Image (spheres, coloured by chain):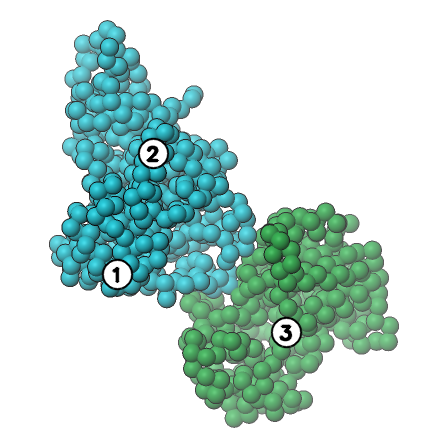
Amino acid sequence: MTNRTAYTNARLLDPATGLDAIGGLLVEGTKIADFGPALFRDGVPEGVERIDCGGACLAPGLVDLRADVGEPGFEHNETLLTASRSAAAGGITALACLPNTDPVLDDVAGLEFIARRAREVKLVKIFAYASVTRETAGREIAEMGLLAEAGAVGFTDGTSPVTDAGVMRRALSYAKTWGRTIFQHPAEPSLAAGGAMNAGEVATRLGLKGISPMAEIIMLERDLRLVEMTGGRYHAANISTAESVDVIRRAKRKGLKVTCDTAPPYFSLTEVDVGDYRTFFKLSPPLRGEMDRRAIIDGLADGTIDAIASDHAPRDQDVKRVPFGQAAFGSVGFETLLPLVLELVHKEHLSLLGALDTVTRRPADILGLKGMGRLAKGGAADLVLFDAERPWKVEAEKLASKSKNSCFDRRPVQGMVLRTVVDGRTVHSKAD
Amino acid sequence: MPPHPHDLDARADSLPHRDLLGIQGLTAPEINLILDLADGYVAQNRSARKFSDVLAGRTVVNLFFENSTRTRTSFELAAKRLGGDAINMSVDGSSVKKGETLIDTAMTLNAMHLDVLVVRHQESGAPKLLADKVNCAVINAGDGAHEHPTQALLDALTIRRHKGSLKGLTVAICGDILHSRVARSNIHLLNIMGANVRVVAPPTLVPSGLDRLGVEVHHSMKTGLKDADIVMMLRLQLERMQGQYLPSQREYFRFFGLDYEKLTVAKPDVLVMHPGPMNRGVEIDSLVADDIHRSVILEQVELGVAVRMACLDLLTRTRN
């Protein structure tokens, strides 16, 4: 007997096609069998499980471009199991994890380990980047062909930028052969070294070493020259400054194969939030000024910034309950991703479909995940059901992530995930 | 004749703060209260009978994560002259090497029922982190490049005793502003008290956004010192000398070291200050440093004890 589930009375949302209508969706096994306003008009057939969505939004599950999941090597921060639970609670059905593990994901065995653990955990779909360079040391490029064959969705040194221009040039050229993109965390180390927060008045007042916005902008400018030279595909991760948005905008006008993303802190918070040395606000790149925050929103609104990633970076207490200068960078992000993206809708910066596009279709396309991030007949039944209006307050202690370092702790938000479905299976359901 | 500390005590004035973590957050009347009380302690320190029992039964711990003989001794003397028990703890990494975190250290000390914890740490914000975890008052004795409030208070007391008031004075703070907590505390204090603040430093030693802290930034001693009432020199950390921020010691002294020639543009009755220890011939010429008509460097050291006595006194008044 086929396992069939009918989602009725849903607000169907699909950024890929512009669909926004009340209707129903039928899941058969692991696939979407049908959907549309007319479906179930004559009632739900016998023998089909029915889920009444009560008018809530039913959209493609979120695809997360960037997460640091800790396993292998940093299981005290997060494991693939706890990360999967947290992602599922955030409405994320597929995620790509960074290679900054121990050992680094720079060989086929590492990728196979992730794939095996993901199968065992069997909650959300977990993909992995492989490192651009061996050990993410920035010197020799990794075995990109073998790694692409083994399933690497892209190449990145994760939180370590590829700083050597020659290495970046070779990586962009070589990755092209395998149809993969180089994902860069743009931060010129000679301008960022030792810095703890954005350079400027607040850092000066707090006596903290600043990270100049130029560290990001200069590396971006350099990389884009190399993209122009090599014809490679390049993605800038975690864009945080107004000038970066301009640089990307110009590159796109030139027709370069460039995409970029940002993360919720960069359109929701500023350097002022660091307050009295609150280490949960120590992020990489650092929180910037108000003008930068607004420029990021503008970049999202005009499509210069393609996607929003969770930039999930779990860190345990030992590395956060220390003086700011010594604290680790990062904040957890899975469970706050959707409500903060929806905040852009509530504040009328983006349309609902436009906002969802940044966390569904576009990240799936950037990663080359065919058929993901959209509603399609015959496509995988990866869905999120959410109430876009429902208010709640982020309470870090209640997050499913193993680490509780949320820079949005105690923030009132609007938009709650009610159910997350992966390949037709409910992997998270909000208990009322 | 300044009031005797115990007369002030009778007024039962106190600070509406549990801790002294920085000058930022203090008001002009609060600063004046500390300085008035310190004035009284200067008189006590100069008398034959230097001791009182204001802190009798109280325990003050000097927790220093960075070496500092003068500041630590000054706090120790201040606590002892008020009749308190002063204990010095130098954490040169022994507990830290065993894996103990700053918060573990704080919790351990907290269990011993201290009254005041005086903290120096190489990281900005470390005293604040400790203050959130302990029940006693915390005094910041210098954290990273953030603040060193008692140094700014003793500088203010020194200036006030010579000039009568800080209001309207032109004060030039010169040298390594980028790494200086003394500069930041002084900038805040002088702004609160109505002085005109200038900083003079090579561009590589000026942190970004400094002009938004209410100071004029100069890169020339000639313009920065013009008509100055006070010149505060800062210690240049010699390890920063070669290549990274400055080309050489020789070049630094030529353009930014204080000598008589550069001082000629300042007011004739200009006061020269330095928080010490000095690098003679690097940021300051010995002739200027030792000029008893202009240099008040040793007086700063003397008044430091009185200011710290006032701070210990005020912070323990409301804590029974």
User: What is the crowding at mark 3: few (fewer than 14 residues within 10 Å), some, or many (at least 20)?
Assistant: many
Q: For marks 2 and 1, give the one nearer the viewer.
A: 2
| Residue A167: mark | 1
Q: Is residue B14 above or below residue A49?
A: below
In screen coordinates, is A195 left or right of A380? right
| Residue drawn where x is 49% and y is 84% of the image | B249
Task: Give coordinates of residue B38: x percent, y percent.
Answer: 73, 69
3 and 1 marks in contact (CB < 8 Å): no
Q: Real-space Cα distance between discs 2 and 3?
A: 65 Å
| Residue drawn where x is 20% and y is 13% of the image | A40
Q: Which residue is mark 3?
A: B155
Task: Name the subunit of mark 1.
Answer: A
Question: Secondary structure beneath disc 1?
Answer: helix
User: What is the crowding at mark 2: few (fewer than 14 residues within 10 Å), some, or many (at least 20)?
Assistant: few
Image colour for chain B is green
Task: Name the subunit of mark 2.
Answer: A
Q: For marks 3 and 1, give the one nearer the viewer.
A: 1
Q: Which residue is mark 2?
A: A116
From this viewpoint, which residue is outermost toward the top? A46
Task: Name the subunit of mark 3.
Answer: B
Residue flagged by tag 1: what amino acid is it?
Val
Nearer to us in this view, A112 or A331: A112
Based on the displayed image, in which of its 4 quarters is residue B298 positioned? bottom right
Question: Secondary structure beneath disc 2?
Answer: helix
Image colour for chain A is cyan
Residue flagged by tag 3: what amino acid is it?
Asp
Based on the displayed image, in which of its 4 quarters is residue A393 positioned? top left
